[in-house]
Image (spheres, rainbow, N blue to C red):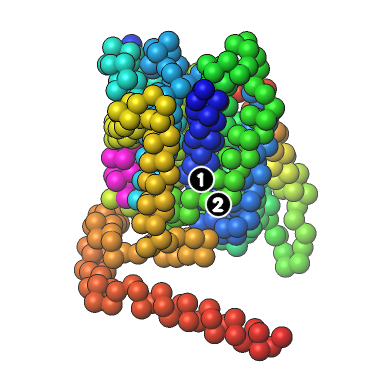
Amino acid sequence: MTTYVEWDALAQVAIFGLVLGAGLPALFALGVRALDGPGSHPGKGAPRPRFRVILAWTCFGLVAAAALGAVIFIASGGH
Amino acid sequence: MTEPILLAIVVATALAFDFTNGFHDTGNAMATSIATRALKPKQAVVLSATLNFVGAFLSIAVAATIAKGIVDSGVVTLEIVLAGLAGAIVWNLITWLLSIPSSSSHALVGGVVGAVIAGVGTSAVLWTGLVSKVLIPALIAPLVAIAVASVATWLVMRITRGVAEKQNDKLFRWGQIGSASLVSLAHGTNDAQKTMGIILLALIAAGAVAPDAGVPLWVIASCALAMGLGTYVGGWRVIRTLGKGLVELSSRQGMAAETSSATVILASSHFGYSLSTTHVATGSILGSGVGMKGASVRWGVAGRIFIAWLITVPAAATAGAIFFFISNAVGEPLGPFVAFGLLIAAAILIWFLARRRPVSSANVNDEWDPHNESETFVAESIARHDPTIMRVRKRRLKKKKKRPKAPQQRKKKKKKVAKGKSKKAKS
């Protein structure tokens, strides 16, 4: 079977895909939760706790950085 | 004498293939954004077309050779390339007519393999390469994508459980647009290069450019333009199947699906295990249904798509072989012209067939018609452990059958006309 399936490359794709492909959406979701999740608005009209806002934008920033990295990767030939 | 004209025909056919490629694959990137209304249908295709166009210019690092490692490259002549391209275009158009997302690169490989078999014989096909580089990845790609997207969706759903749906939609739509843009960009870079490679090879074979020449600018520009135009025209039928047919998508699922598509596609090209964009994107959308509690996946639709993937290579090969036989039977000077004419005739025929039930930006997001999908309800009732779904819907199904679709459409048209009139009256 090894002549037909390149197991090494496949395993790398699967692991990389799982870590980033599931990790990045999860990170983004964490940002959303920090911004608007339960407890984000402590009282009526009260502003969000600052650490939540910082956490949220850190998450979004990391995701955006990953997207930027992907664009550079595509532009550099993708190999 | 006929060589320059033959070359022109091959270049035109290659660009036509590029067009159908963009056209067929718009849905891979944009179907989820359109279905969740993160973008209006027209906005989505404009964005995707622009990014495909830009993507084509981004990199020409891959000196893409046509069907490398799959057929003996020494036997590939202009006639074979032409027949292969024609076969691939026909298969792309047929799958579009049937609203099935299928891989354009597999169609191209199939078409060329068929033409090679018809022209040289089975000995010129590297079967191990065909199986390991095309057929097996076609089975693996959706599995990897389903796994990644279902994990992603499950995580996203769990993390954002307590967030109000409105806020979720607002933020995740941005995530969706970003990830869909990445898929478009990657598609433009990867797939436009394939056509550039074909045109370059044809130019070299005809002696129009030196064998060690780089890709001329006009080739890059015309490929980018053909791909962008194809994307802009938008294979609405395929978009509809991907966005509405497989899973009823929310913006969170859409974002998870599109991000996992982008990651798996980029990972596969990085590690040199090329997976088809279409297979990955379709798998990701399925995965976003698998990973969400209570979401139902229309496995009937998915099954039809899988079958189409299995027969893509043989079917395109048959079409490619037929084109080669016709071209060969007619003879040397006129053969390729006849094949080209037949290709145009076939394209026009398929276009007319598609006009009978048109899908456009106006109705791409309509409810998925249960009239054709009785197996959907069986699947849904099993998935939700709820036999009543089958019973209730069955009655509706009968009603739908009694009342065919045509009069409804007419009503809608009338409404539109009426609206137009009232607007005119106002102005």
Q: How many marks can you see?
A: 2
Q: Can I make out residue B89 in this image? A: yes
- Whether residue B426 sits left or right of residue B309 in the image: it is right
Front position in the image: B27 or B146: B27
Residue A52 part of the magenta-drawn span: no
Query: Which residue appears farthest toward the bottom when viewing the image?
Result: B425
Q: Residue A27 sits in which quadrant? A: top right
Residue B308 part of the magenta-drawn span: yes
Q: Position of residue B89 (x, y in %)?
A: 42, 38
Could you confirm whether marks 1 and 2 are on the same chain? yes
Q: Which mark is residue B23?
A: 1
Q: CA distance from mark 1 to mark 2?
A: 6 Å
* Residue type, mark 1 in image: Phe
Q: Are marks 1 and 2 in contact (CB under 8 Å)?
A: yes
Residue appearing at x 53%, y 81% in the figure: B417
- Label 2 SS: helix
- Whether residue A75 sits left or right of residue B307 in the image: it is right
Residue appearing at x 65%, y 83% in the figure: B423
Residue annotated with mark 2? B233
Q: Chain of mark 1?
A: B
Magenta-colored segment: predominant secondary structure:
helix
Q: Position of residue B134 (x, y in %)?
A: 37, 24
The image quadrant where one finds the C terminus of chain B is: bottom right
Magenta highlight range: B301-310
